[in-house]
Amino acid sequence: MGKKEQSKICIMVIPHTKKVRRLMIPSWLPKLITLSIIGVSISILLIITTITWSHSNLKEEYEDKISEINALQEENKNKELEILRLKNQKKELLSKSEEIEKKLEEIDKLQRDLEKMAGIKNPSRSSTIRRNIPPEISESSDKIQVLKETLELKEKELETFIDQMEERLAYLETVPDLWPARGRLTSRFGNRKNPFGRGTRFHYGIDIANSVGTDIWAAGKGVVTFAGTKGGYGRTIIIDHGNGYKTLYAHNSKLLVKVGDRVEKGQVIAKMGSTGRSTGSHLHFEVHKSGKPINPLNILN
């Protein structure tokens, strides 16, 4: 009887007004409850771990799929662009083909007309046309000769026109109408207030201000006739353009050409500076026509 009591746990409930109650529970029950709680906790932990691992795998798979979809979309976009490019090429080729066919038809028609005028009944489609024309078609031969002379005349006119255009373009390259530097126009051609004293002085060019080292360009094609220090102008370049025009570029910090150099329009010939009598970094630019200074703003584009 004593051993049975030791295997049980007694719980006493003492209320305020009622009789004391005793509850007897087996000693193994708390252990069982504790083990059950631990087991349930482990199970829940395993379930949470499994769910978390599955979610992580699903997230990675989702991101991989998204990356794959993006790659496929990019590839599809590139394919569409390639297809569009090929379509445009096809249209261009078709257009060129139609243009060539049209030209060939025009040439073929002209050849047939010439053969008809020459009295050739069985025209050849080779690269040469039969030249033995019967005497009875001398009138047609005269027409062909007139046509030939007309074509030769047009050819000479075209050659003359091309020569004139080339001469015009060559001349335009020598005209100093290109702005020689980027910057602010700080002084114009004509009378201005003397920056170094009282009164006014005539300014024979324009001033373009910018930072030291700014590129100075040749305003036109020509030959360098002066490159060095020139009194109050400081480091100076003078270019003869061979058509009555000369240009002067003053106050440079560095000269990049020498006397005798042939320069092209737009070529960098110097770097902007403030040498000589100068109030700051700028280019003093002059244009001379037939030995006389003119307003550069009347010629610069």
Image: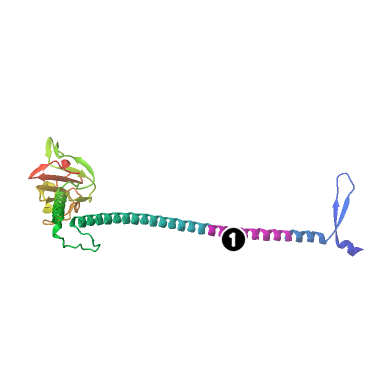
Please provide percent x and percent y for residue 119: 19, 57
Please provide percent x and percent y for residue 224: 12, 54
What is the chief secondary structure element of the magenta stretch?
helix
Residue under the point 73% across and 59% down: 40
Image position of 109 (left or right of 169)? right
- Looking at the rendering, the stretch of residues picked out in magenta corresponds to 39-65
- Please name whichever residue, 93 or 17, is drawn nearer the observer in this view of the structure: 93
- Please name whichever residue, 101 or 86, is drawn nearer the observer in this view of the structure: 101
Q: Quadrant of residue 111?
A: bottom left
Which amino acid, mark 1?
Asn
Q: How many marks?
A: 1
Residue under the point 12% across and 46% down: 232
Image position of 85 (left or right of 136)? right
Please provide percent x and percent y for residue 11: 85, 54
Please tell me whether residue 238 belongs to the stretch shown in magenta: no
Q: Residue furthest left?
A: 291
- Please name whichever residue, 67 or 116, is drawn nearer the observer in this view of the structure: 116
Residue under the point 79% across and 61% down: 32
Q: Quadrant of the N terminus?
A: bottom right
Q: Residue furthest right?
A: 1
CA neighbours of label 1 inside 10 A, class few (<14), some (14 to 19), many (20+): few
Residue under the point 90% across and 63% down: 2
Q: Quadrant of the C terminus?
A: top left
